[in-house]
Image (cartoon, helix red, strand yellow):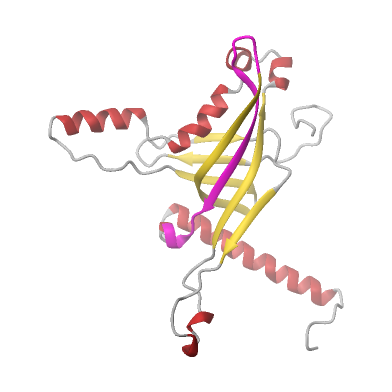
């Protein structure tokens, strides 16, 4: 696998996760230096439950539920070779911390809530999760929820900072049914679905143009 940071390698896009906390709207970004070699997508149709005789089983309750599993890699080798100050001092700890913070409530918010609750000013409720977006390419920009991830740290510097790690991610795609059509995340998903339908139309046009006989024709 060739690093995209090498001057000899072609310029390619990178998969990334972006999250924005609704309380402290400062973007959190994790860019994978090496794109995953494999993306596993599981799609589960949401079929309406009802009377089969009335044709309810042929109705959809909403967009299909999709889960994505992928492996990403973080590696500080190139930065260390170029004497990058952050990589030299911390390895890839900043990138790993950015990923982990996507599933942690902000410390400042939690401390504030606990103090206000202790003096009887508020009742503590669960903290809203940040809106997390998977950016794969222009046709796949999806709101997701990090269901779980596994970090395998594979190499360390002399201070025991990790300098290479593999991250296995399990993501649940969030739809406009989950988020609301007029929310930011819901609108992003709807744009993705419209793009998917346009690509399906391209497939049909390509099939017809190629002269491949269609079923029943």
Residue located at (46% from left, 57% from top): 186
Quarter of the image containing the C terminus? bottom right
Answer whether residue 168 is magenta in the image: yes
Answer whether residue 61 is magenta in the image: no
* Residue 34, image quadrant: top right
- Whether residue 130 is situated above or below residue 6 in the rendered picture: below
User: x%, y% of residue 28?
Assistant: 49, 34
User: x%, y% of residue 33?
Assistant: 68, 32
Residue located at (78% from left, 88% from top): 216
Residue located at (23% from left, 31% from top): 114
Residue located at (19% from left, 40% from top): 123
Quarter of the image containing the N terminus? top right
* Residue 157, image quadrant: top right
User: x%, y% of residue 4?
Assistant: 75, 32
Please, which residue is most extreme toward the left here? 120
Residue 138 horizontal side relative to residue 188, left or right:
right
Q: Which residues are magenta?
A: 156-178
For the residue pair 59 and 4, the one nearer the viewer reads as: 59
Camera sees residue 108 = yes
Please, which residue is most extreme toward the right here? 211
* Residue 29, image quadrant: top right
Camera sees residue 139 = no
């Amino acid at each position: 696998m060739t690093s995209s940071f090498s001057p000899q390698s072609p310029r390619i896009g990178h998969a990334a996760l972006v999250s924005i906390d609704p309380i402290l709207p400062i973007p959190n970004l994790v860019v994978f230096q090496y794109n995953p070699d494999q993306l596993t997508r599981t799609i589960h149709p949401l079929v309406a439950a009802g009377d089969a005789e009335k044709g309810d089983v042929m109705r959809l309750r909403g967009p299909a539920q999709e889960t994505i599993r992928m492996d990403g890699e973080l590696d500080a080798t190139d930065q260390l070779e170029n004497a990058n100050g952050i990589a030299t001092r911390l390895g890839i700890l900043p990138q790993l911390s950015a990923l982990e913070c996507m599933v942690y409530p902000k410390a400042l918010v939690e401390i504030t809530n606990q103090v206000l609750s202790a003096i009887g000013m508020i009742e503590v409720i669960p903290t809203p999760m940040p809106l997390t977006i998977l950016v794969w390419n222009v046709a796949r920009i999806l709101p997701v929820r990090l269901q779980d991830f596994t970090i395998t740290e594979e190499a360390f510097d002399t201070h025991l900072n990790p300098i290479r790690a593999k991250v296995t991610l399990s993501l649940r795609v969030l739809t406009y049914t989950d988020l609301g059509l007029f929310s930011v995340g819901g609108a992003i998903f709807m744009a993705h679905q419209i793009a998917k339908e346009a690509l399906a139309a391209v497939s049909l046009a390509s099939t017809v143009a190629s002269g491949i006989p269609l079923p029943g024709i």
